[in-house]
Amino acid sequence: MHQSYVPMLLLTIVAAGTAVGMIALSHFAGPRRPTEAKGEPYESGMPPLGSARERFSVKFYLVAMLFIVFDLETVFLIPWGAIYFGSSGGAPGMGFLLVEMIVFLVILFAGWVYVWKRGALEWD
């Protein structure tokens, strides 16, 4: 039973070792030429105005959450499309898979219409 976990453990060790190795290599082998200009804050080519601690509108967070919700759609649609369209048309269970995705898209579309009607997609 423990032999089935050995490849996963090796993969985890190699991935962690690669990540740590790249960070260590960039820290020790990277060029270091600090200047005053490199130490200044930079934001879109403009000097920063005001404090970084100022309050944001709730609208900003709503738009961010909506982006995450609707972005998750692609996370579900891409694997579904690969499975559904990559299979040989008459594979068992494909009808259920299609109905399941249609229900998901209807619920997502209903949420989108609700958000649109509430005016959350309008930027002031």
Image (spheres, helix red, strand yellow):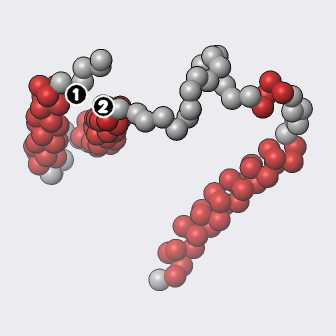
Which residue is denoted by mark 2 in the rendering? 59
- Residue 42 position within the rendered picture, expressed as x and y whole percent measured from the top left: 66, 25
Q: Residues within 10 Å of mark 1 (few under 14, many from 20)?
A: some
Q: Amino acid at mark 2?
A: Lys
Q: Secondary structure at mark 1?
A: loop
| Residue shown at the point (72%, 56%) measured from the top left | 20
92 or 38: nearer the viewer = 38
Q: Residue furthest bottom?
A: 1
| Residue shown at the point (15%, 51%) measured from the top left | 92
Q: Is residue 32 left or right of residue 59?
A: right
- Residue 99 position within the rendered picture, expressed as x and y whole percent measured from the top left: 10, 43
Q: Is residue 54 left or right of residue 90?
A: right
Residue 98: quarter of image: top left
Mark seen at residue 120: 1
Q: Residues within 10 Å of mark 2 (few under 14, many from 20)?
A: some
| In the image, residue 49 above or below residue 93 | above
| Residue shown at the point (15%, 36%) measured from the top left | 111
Q: CA distance from mark 2 to mark 1?
A: 7 Å
